[in-house]
Image (cartoon, rainbow, N blue to C red):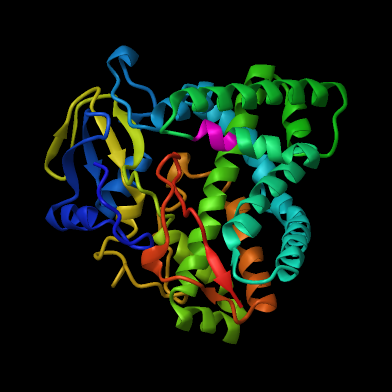
């Protein structure tokens, strides 16, 4: 690993080959560690919500790590060891009522960015014009971060996610935590109607816990959404009949969001969710030993032919009920509705305002970001 990604919008051929041979595979990571890579849908679904696996190694000194696990461990902090309590603190801030109240703000921010896009002469890089700025503006609005700080905030988050430069990653993480520490202190003194203030007001929560949750929300809500906006739009533009289906029936947009999420973001690392075995157990005829490094590959699972017919073909009318894109059970992504809201608003406004939008280059010319944990497209050049 990693397997070569020959088409940025398709499953890596190496993953497809492994998946055809079984559900659980012995692999070697880019760091040289041995790991179990799980690619079958049933097995990934089971292990995503299985207490025989944990985020922390039983013996931390002996832990194998993939390129992103050190950063994830720093961001998660106590979340790994006190997951149920901290998750319970977060969930009310992602309630359907909260997300419904946030949607007009997402629509306003998206509309403003598309006004700026419309004023430009095509071709334009849609990643720079929309996918990159929107999520950080939404996160700032929702969390209560001053919009004038959004550029610094976004820069630190991108640096923290850098897997090619450990020094830069550490510096970005340090800047992010330093800013969040001051932000939490300010919210304690002068609360407002925003998520950080509401989290601070929770009885019994410590400043360090608020700090960790704030940094986690920023990272999880920014980098991943940038990548997914790029994937969503590029998949549809690369399949004009699917884009046309949305023009003909905008009611298909929620389903289009779910389908593009199922096909997932282009990620050159193509490993999986890192977990450690907390005990010996067997799955699909393979024995996993205590302390083994396990990678749950959601992208491969969402391309399992036993669950999704012709999984490499985008179909905005597909039933995606079994998609694992946001995890499963107790470890499902708490921010799923926030991501869905942004993608639905983006597609709705793009289809309405730029019905003739199309890719400027072929899919084979689209490149992936290799130096970041999340991946995503380098550019998304479009015209209309």
Q: Residue furthest bottom?
A: 248
Q: Of 336 and 380, which appears nearest the observer?
A: 380
Q: Is residue 222 left or right of residue 25?
A: right
Q: Of 312 and 100, which appears nearest the observer?
A: 312
Q: Which residues are magenta?
A: 157-161
Residue 364, position as x, y percentages in the image: 36, 66
**Vertical comparison of 345 with 63: above or below:** below
**Type of secondary structure dominating the magenta stretch:** helix
Q: Residue at x 58, y 61 (%)?
A: 125
State which quarter of the image contains the N terminus: top left
Q: Of 244 and 317, which appears nearest the observer?
A: 244
**Vertical comparison of 366 with 42: above or below:** below
Q: Residue at x 58, y 77 (%)?
A: 357
Residue 15, position as x, y percentages in the image: 23, 53
Q: Residue at x 50, y 35 (%)?
A: 161
Q: Does any portion of residue 207 appear in the rendered image?
A: yes
Q: Which quadrant of the figure has residue 129?
A: bottom right
Q: Is residue 327 left or right of residue 284?
A: right
Residue 340, position as x, y percentages in the image: 58, 58
- Residue 4: say if magenta: no
Residue 153, position as x, y percentages in the image: 67, 35
**Vertical comparison of 1 with 353: above or below:** above
Q: Residue furthest right?
A: 190
Q: Does any portion of residue 217 appear in the rendered image?
A: no
Q: Residue at x 78, y 61 (%)?
A: 112
Q: Is residue 84 left or right of residue 113?
A: left
């Amino acid at each position: 690993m990693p397997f070569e990604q020959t088409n940025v919008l398709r499953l890596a051929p190496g993953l497809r080959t492994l998946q055809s041979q079984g559900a659980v595979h012995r692999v070697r990571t880019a760091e040289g560690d041995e790991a179990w890579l799980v690619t079958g849908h049933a097995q990934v679904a089971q292990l995503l919500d299985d207490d025989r696996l944990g985020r922390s190694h039983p013996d931390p000194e002996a832990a194998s790590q993939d390129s992103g696990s050190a950063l994830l461990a720093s961001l998660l902090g106590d979340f790994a060891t006190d997951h149920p309590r901290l998750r319970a603190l977060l969930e009310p801030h992602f309630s359907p009522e909260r997300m419904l109240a946030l949607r007009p703000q997402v629509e306003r921010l998206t509309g403003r960015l598309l006004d700026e896009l419309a004023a430009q002469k095509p071709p334009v890089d849609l990643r720079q014009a929309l996918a990159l700025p929107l999520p950080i503006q939404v996160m700032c609005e929702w969390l209560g971060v001053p919009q004038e700080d959004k550029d610094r905030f976004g820069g630190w988050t991108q640096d923290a996610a850098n897997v090619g430069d450990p020094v830069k990653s550490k510096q970005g993480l340090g800047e992010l935590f330093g800013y969040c520490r001051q932000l939490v202190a300010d919210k304690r003194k002068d609360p407002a109607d925003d998520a950080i203030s509401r989290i601070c007001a929770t009885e019994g929560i410590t400043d360090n816990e608020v700090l960790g949750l704030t940094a986690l929300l920023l990272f999880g809500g920014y980098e991943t959404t940038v990548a997914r906006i790029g994937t969503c739009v590029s998949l549809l533009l690369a399949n004009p009949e699917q884009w046309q289906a949305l023009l003909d029936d905008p009611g298909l947009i929620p389903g289009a969001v779910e389908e593009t999420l199922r096909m997932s973001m282009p990620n050159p690392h193509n490993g999986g969710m890192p977990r450690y075995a907390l005990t010996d157990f067997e799955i699909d005829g393979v024995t996993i030993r205590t302390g083994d490094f396990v990678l749950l590959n959601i992208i491969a699972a969402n391309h399992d032919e036993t669950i999704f017919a012709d999984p490499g073909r985008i179909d905005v009318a597909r039933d995606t009920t079994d998609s694992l894109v946001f995890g499963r059970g107790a470890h499902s992504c708490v921010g799923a509705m926030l991501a869905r809201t942004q993608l639905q608003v983006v597609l709705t406004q793009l289809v309405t305002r730029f019905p003739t939008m199309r890719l400027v280059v072929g899919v084979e010319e689209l490149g992936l970001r290799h130096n970041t944990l999340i991946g995503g497209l380098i550019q998304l050049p479009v015209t209309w």
